[in-house]
Structure formats: C-alpha cells, structure tokens
Amino acid sequence: MASDRGTVTQPKGRPPALFPLFAGIDTLPGIGPKGQAALAQMGIERPRDMVLTLPSGGITRRSIARVGDARAPEIVTLAVTVERHTQPSARGRPMRVQCSDDHGGDLTLVFFHPRKDWIERQLPLGQRRIVSGKLELFDGMAQIVHPDHILPEGEELPPAFEPVYPLSAGLTQKAMTKAAEAALTRLPETPEWIDPQVMAARGWPDFATALHQAHHPDSAQGLSPASPARARLAYDEFLAHQMTLALVRREKRRSKGRPSTGDGRLRQAVLDNLPWPPTNAQARAVREIAADMAGDHRMSRLLQGDVGAGKTLVAMLSALIAVEAGGQAVLMAPTEILARQHARALEPLARSADIRLAALTGRDKGEARAQILEDLREGRIQILVGTHAVFQKDVEFRDLRLAIIDEQHRFGVAQRLQLSAKGNAPPDILVMTATPIPRSLALTQYGDLDLSVLDEKPPGRQPITTVMISDERLDQVADRLQHAIAEGARAYWVCPLVEESEVSDLTAAEARFQALRARFGDAVRLIHGQMPADQRDAAMADFSSGVAQILVATTVIEVGVDVPEATIMVIERAESFGLAQLHQLRGRVGRGKGASTCLLMYHPPLGETGAKRLTTLRDTEDGFRIAEVDLEMRGAGDVIGTAQSGLPRFHIGDLEHQAGLMATARKDARALLERDPELSSDRGKALRLLMWLMSQDESIRLIGIG
C-alpha cells in the first residue's frame, strides 16, 4: 500500500486531480501514527474520507460583556483581566485562576492536572484575555472549568456556532478540525454532475461550496439533512450509488436471455378454476413479468407484496409462462416447511393446468430422489418447488427458463448466481419478498431489479382485530380460547423470543405446550425448528385438518404457513419481537372466511419502544406503513437484517429521511444512461469523476470505455 509516508498506489484510470484526496491520511498536518489508528477506527483512511465526515453537532456560544449577563449554565465568550493564580493546596486539587471583567464581575477559571508553566504562558498576570467555555455557578460564584478557548485580545473570536465532529478514542476536536480544514484544501475544481434542472429547482450550491458550508454551519439548521448543502451532498452519494446499480442492471440486460412467450392456455385453465378473479395488482404484475420474459434480455424483477397480497398466484402464473414456452420453472423457499407449503398450495393449480409439479428438499433420499432427478432431467416435471437442495450439482433441468426465489433476504447473492448457472442459458429471475420494504430501501437494495408491487388484497381476506393485553391476564386469555375452541376455532400460540438462542426459544415453547396440554388435552400440538421433519409435518397436518385446534410454535411459522381455518393468533411476550416479524405472524390468520383476532400479550411494564411497536401494529394492517415505522425505529440495516442487508454505508446520505432524493437519483441515473450510454458527454464525464470520488471504481469498468 504505502512505500513512503502517504504514498498510495492509485488504481488505473483514477483522474490525477483526485490523487491528493486519495493519499494516505497521515499526509494531513497533525496526523501521526496514533491519529492514523484512531481515525481508522472511524473508517477514515484518506483525506477524501475526512472531507465526507461532517460535523455531527454544534456548540452555540454567546458573546457577553460582563459576567453578570450570563444565564448559567451557558457557553459564553467574554474578555477578562487575569488577577491571580492560586496553586492547589493538595495533590489532585485543581489550580484556579481568578479573573475580572471590565465591570468588576469575578470569574474563576478551573484547571485539573495543569502544567504551571503552560498556565503562566496562556494566562499571564495582569493581561487581558478572551475566554470561552461553559460558565456555571459554584457556591454562587461564576466559574469555567477548562475553557475551550483562551485567546489574546485582537485574535479572531471563536464562532457563534461551532461545529463538533464525531471522535474516537485518542482524537481531539482540535485535531479533527485541523485535519478537516487541510483535507478541504485538496478539493479539485469539479464540473457539475447534477442535472441543471434539479440544481435550480432545489436551490443547491455547487459541490465545493456545499462541502465548505457543511463543514462550517452557522447555526443548528446547517446540521439538518434538509439544509441545501447537506441535501446536495447526500444526493451526490445517492447518484453515484444509483449510477452503479443502473450499470449493473444494464450489464444484466446485456446478458442475453431467451424469449419465453406463452400462449396463455395453461394460465387460463388455472384462472378458470379460481374462486375469484385476480386483483388488478396481481394482473398488472403478471403482465409486467410476461413482457420481461418475452424480451431478448434476461429478466431480473422483484415482486414485493404485503402479507396475503397473493404472491403465490403470481408466481404460479409466471411459472406457467415458462411451461407454455416449452420450458421449466423452479420456485425456491428458505425453509422446508415453506417449500412443502408452497408445493401443497400450488398442486391443485398445477392439476387444473394438467402439468406436473414436484417438491425437492433435503429430506428426499434414495430412490424417490433419484426418480425426481431423472424426471426433471427428462422434462417430465415442469415445475419444481424446493429449498437450497436445488443448488446441488446433481440437480439438472432439461430447460430451466424461470427461477423464482421466495423471501430474498434469506438467500445470498452467491446462491442467486449458482442458480443462474442451472440450465442451458441463465434463466429469468423473479425475486419475491413478503416483507414490505420502504421504497427508499427497495431502491437501495434492489435498485438493479425492476419492481412490481402487490398493493391490494384479494377478495375474501378478512380484517384482523388486534388487541394488546398484559400477560397478567393469561388465565382470561386461556378461558376465551377454551370458549372459541368449543365453537370450532383453531389458534396459533407463538412463544417468546427469550433471547437469540434456539435453545431458550425451545424451552419457552415446550413449557407453554405442557401448560396448554394440561388444560386442553389432545387438542394441542407443538412445532419448532429442531423437531425431526416427519414429526413437524405430522403436527402441521393435524392442525391443518382440524384434528388439533391449538398449535404452539416458535417463529418457525413466521412465513408461508397457510391454514385458512385458523382465526386466532396469540403472540406471547410480543414486545420482544420486531415489527416486521409481528406483522408476518399476524398474517397467518385472516386467511379464510371467519373473523380473526391477534392477541399481543406483553409483560408489563411496557417500555417506550415496545409500546410504539405494539400500538403501531394494533392501529394498522398496512405492511408498508408498518415498515416505515420499523425503519424510523431501527434504522436501515436492521430492517433488512444487518448481516444480509447488503446496504451501502453512506457518509452523508440518510435513508430514513431522504427517501425522495434516492428516488430522484434513480430516475436521473437511468435517464442519463439511456441518453449517454458511454458517459461521453460533458455531464457524463463529470459523473465519472463523481463515481471515482465516491469509490465506485468497480462500476466504472462497466461503462464500456471507462
């Protein structure tokens, strides 16, 4: 990396004007090995990182003429005369410097562990000094402990609003400010990369001015994401990110797909057998998918739908397009329970279209598995439903045209690529998620995919009454449950997430199962992730058929379990679950004709965060509204799941508060690439510079002549 202090090998193609910003951080004044290590902890390794690290707060200082004008405790700046130094009377005691203002007001400056010679140099007896710091009253006397500034008269006063930078151990505000000022001097002149109309409409400054203003705010408003300087800089980050996604998307589209055009007969056979027609949203999504599949380019589409919006039907109709075109489709689910559930739900639809659908999970062994693999290879199975077992090398398709991935955030990118390698040519890809994701996050995480949203519920879905109830009323809940079960109801009882450990979740579930079994006898079944698959299936089958009426479960039932007759959902210690998870669990009821209820049982006293989660869920069934609240409460990484989120780290951009800017950046990036595919216009060249500046080096290779 560095052969000499600050010498850095620059990648091929990086404009020389940016070299000073991409030098070592130790080339900035005052940054030695210790400072370099402290800055590295904050992710600051180059002057460019320093430039994009903005103040996180600020201090308002009021200039006053006399000590008596202070409204203690308050940060003030005033002129004083140094009267005397009082040495500490004992070790560990502070040194005090008595001062007075021009009106006879007294002020004591207090220093702990001081060096006597330093104090005598800074505050010589009889001299006037400007001091600034937090003035407080101690036994009725005004004092400032360790003033922030001590200046001779005539020097420039500290600003009325002083920005404060984030720090890590071993760094001071002074060192940080000095490094930031030095880094700003390395900014080259940059051409404008933002669309002039966007600039004019928003009233944004140019890039260099925006950085200077953001580092030197003159009031607290300058720290707000909505301030023109910060909004512009956030947009720069979003634009570079969306350019990258637009380039990746273009690259995917350049990879030739095979047009799959169906004649509609199989789809019509399924539609003719449905109890009611698809919603407008379902019909629109199928049209969008059919148009993609008929094109020359490979489809990469995200189907996003709330709980119960009918994604399964859209998936089946999409799979039938592949079959009508003479090919095969695969639907992959993250768990065995969900894969088997999908297979059961789709089997009647496959029968009505007179095609063969099979399930393949890790449980299939021996001759049965060998037969499925042979039928798949020979094309006798048109639709395969499975878990990650379909990645195994011996799983071969005769003509795989469509791969559908359910619950995308549980699959890694590497697995998506593995799946793409199946079949003669890479298949079209449809990603489905039942987790409503706020639009800003969908654009950030899936910006390379086209988006279809199911925003209507099919007819027949019942509203769910959601009630919050203290677990001190557990006996009343059991009484009500007994009454409902006597009338033929079926209920889920989900056990708490005691902590992130399967063992403790399991203990909680087994204890509740034993307690309910004691009261309700053979009507209760237990299901959890560590049970042998056949036992789990048996418990599920008993509940589905009505042999059992209460199913005690861990969150293994969170996604995809579909028993229309179940109308009661009890969630114990509901405050320990995330909002999205609670919404998914609630979505297991309200699937049939009966009125449904969800009981959110909490353990008092309920904290502020838990209360907000539960009241949000009680007050709305709109998954997208719930996702927005979840985003506000937890932040972007947690909503998608930090480990798999794949979200970029923005220095300045704030996804929670600047979703609109992300949407504008996406539109702008796509439009520019269509007009100027090689980014060879003046604005295109400016955008290349922005992408180098934002470290999107990898993407620049995708431009073509980049």
Image (cartoon, rainbow, N blue to C red):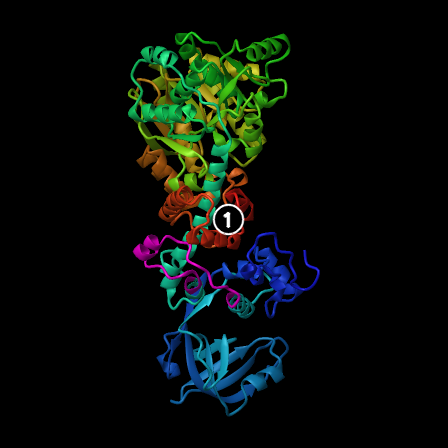
| 625 is higher (above) or lower (below) than 545 | below
Q: Which residue is drawn at 32% across and 56% down?
A: 202
Q: Dot 1, crowdedness within 10 Å: few (<14), some or many (≥20)?
A: few
Q: Is residue 198 above or below residue 328?
A: below
| Residue placed most toward the observer, 498 or 368 | 368
Percent coordinates x, y for residue 491 in the rendering: 40, 21
Q: Nearer the viewer, residue 144 or 605?
A: 144
Q: Is residue 175 left or right of residue 588?
A: right
Tell me the SS state at disc 1. Answer: loop
Q: Nearer the viewer, residue 43 or 491?
A: 43
Residue at position x 37%, y 77% from top? 70
Residue 564 found in image quarter: top left
Image position, residue 344 (x, y; %): 45, 14
Q: Can residue 117 be seen in this view?
A: yes
Q: Which residue lies furthest to the bottom in this view?
A: 126
Residue 203 part of the magenta segment: yes
Asked if 579 appears above or below 38 in the picture, the reply is: above
Residue at numbered disc 1: 649
Point out residue 310 in the picture as x, y percentages from the top left corner. Answer: 37, 23
Instruction: Read off the magenta span.
Output: 184-210
